[in-house]
Image (cartoon, grey):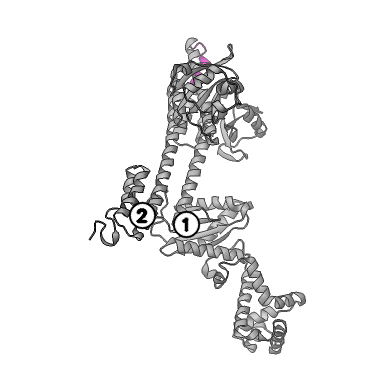
Amino acid sequence: MTAAGRDGEVPGTGDAFLDLLYGEAPLTEFDGVITRASAAGASEDRLAELRRQHAVAVRLRELIARQRVREAELTALYETARDLTAIRELDTILAAIVRRARQLLNADMTYLSLNDEAEGASYMKVTDGALTQEFRSLRLPLGTGLLGLVAQTGAPYFTEDYQADERFVHRGYIDEAVAGEHIRAILGVPLVVDGRVIGALLAVHRTVRRFPSAEVQLLTSFAAHAAVALENARLFADLDEANRTLTAHTTAIESAARAHDLLTDVLLGGGSVGEVADVLAGVLDGEVAVYDPDGELVGGTPAPGPWRSAVEESVASGRTARAGAVWVAAAVAGAEHLGTLVLHGRGTELREVEHRTLERGAVVTALVLLFARSVAEAEERLGGELLADLVDGAADPLLLRERLRRHGVALGDRPLVVAAASAGPDGRAALHRGAVRIARAERGLAAEHAGAVVLLAPGADAVDVGRRLRDAVEAADAGSGRVTVGVAVADGELPPAYADARRCLDVLLTLGRQGDVSDQAGLGVARLLLGTSGPDELAAFVDRTLGPVLAWDERRGTALRATLDAWFATGCQVRSTAERLHVHPNTVVQRLDRVGELLGPAWREPGRSLDLQLALRMVQLQAVR
């Protein structure tokens, strides 16, 4: 016996990829498993299995890596919010802003500049990751270079390769400082307070690269949050110098700081926009409502009055806007309007610092909504991949069980229903939302897969689950259209049940039975005949087989089709047919003779007779709507 063992098997390779995943091994070691197995004489079947395991392991490794990057970004932002809450000293808070911004974007260097309006320049205040003293002491005239342009215009800019980018005004000493740092790609966003640009926050890479819109939006939101915190720190410094002579103003500042702390706690705790509204209502002595961009209430207490007229002004200015007895603050990330805060129910005017508090609440609301969107997108992507692996049967069962556990899905040994649903292009989003709601309530799983919305949910009555899905979607969204659902109960393996559910859905759509729910039993022989056919093929078959009879009935108002149905149902007995139709036997004979004239004398032969019965059944099924 060779070192490879019997049939070329290699001992110990079954768990090799799991061990490498747990050990965070480099990609070359994953490739080495197959190389070593081949060298040891493993069989072709074994090598094929190892290659499949290798592909799954590499996908998992990439997924874990992406998740860690996302966790690192969230950690950086959370730590920044905590630092901004605790730090009051100006230089320390600036250093925290730059350090966290670098961590947030995983940049080679970050730096923050402040504007000197008297000199008309923007100067480096804090850098993190700089290599040269020349760069740390750089001053740029407003409008010069990317930093000077951002500081002057108050708009974000980025470049994939600064030295080769002719959009910016280049100066020799600036380009030399940039070259000394080996800077290539730059992203800059403004620090804006009260509509005034006070500086810029920039992230740098020493390689040529693009900046995705998500990075621009995140850094812009971070800069807005940092600008408010920077102004707050300056305000504290001014108050310290003035010995806190204005008691009322001091009280307002402390209230704003308390609001900032509470809002930060909501952010760090993964809170909702409703919690943000509760915090603001408490510190601003009023009621706060949070609306989505379409004007739907998503948190807080509904606001009265025509507040919508002030939304556009707040979005454009970045400040609160007045609308009668209410104040409006838009939650904006970059150029995207994510939501609107409406403060109402106050008996007094808002002081300036309270305006700032409401605006800070809008910034936190934007961050909460961005985080929720990111989590939802990640859950949808991972849930879709998990469902695809389940119904396609391509993944390792042990890994699938672990992924189900981590996703919060408890399928277990319970009877499981597979539902494949369609609502047309206009209703797909509503259908997906409805399936996700049911999946969460039942600890099941729902996602779009291969052009349909697929729901896996516990239950023994597949048709009942399908009807609950259809009714829930149509009740929640009247514009979703008619929801059609094919269902099956999984008996052991999921892939066969999924295939049955999809076949039922296809047959229902082929028959034109939109809005129906059915399993295989409800379709009978139609599922076998129409599983791969469409409506055109079905219409052609019915017309070819039964068309003259149907046309005769339609023109003359006769009942030849009904007579054929009864005749076949009674075993081709004239008297029994007459009794079923409540007509004289001679009438039946006359009608059957007419059928013969229309279809030809061979219509009673077994082959033609079977085609006729199938066509009649298809017509009956199409009538069930």
Locate residue 482, reporting x and y percent.
Answer: 62, 58
Q: Residue 601 vs residue 136: left or right?
A: right
Q: Is residue 588 above or below residue 617?
A: below
Q: Where does label 1 land, which residue?
A: 456
Q: Which mark is residue 50?
A: 2
Q: Is residue 495 visible?
A: yes
Amino acid under disc 1: Leu
Q: Is residue 436 above or below residue 127?
A: below
Q: Which residues are magenta?
A: 244-254
Q: Quadrant of residue 444?
A: bottom left
Element type at mark 1:
strand
Towards the viewer: 105 or 175 = 175
Amino acid under disc 2: Leu
Q: Is residue 97 visible?
A: no
Towards the viewer: 356 or 551 = 551
- Secondary structure of the magenta portion, mostly? helix
Q: Residue 557 vs residue 233: left or right?
A: right
Q: Which mark is residue 439?
A: none
Element type at mark 2:
helix
Q: Quadrant of the C terminus?
A: bottom right
Q: Residue 299 vs residue 68: left or right?
A: right
> Tags 1 and 2 in contact by the CB under 8 Å rule?
no
Towards the viewer: 309 or 317 = 317
Locate residue 332, reporting x and y percent.
Answer: 58, 32
Crowding at mark 1 (Cα within 10 Å: few <14, some 14-19, many 20+): many
Locate residue 84, reporting x and y percent.
Answer: 45, 24
Crowding at mark 2 (Cα within 10 Å: few <14, some 14-19, many 20+): many
Q: Is residue 450 magenta?
A: no
Locate residue 546, reporting x and y percent.
Answer: 67, 77
Q: Quadrant of residue 69?
A: top left
Q: Of the two numbered discs 1 and 2 on the same chain, state the one appearing first in sequence.
A: 2
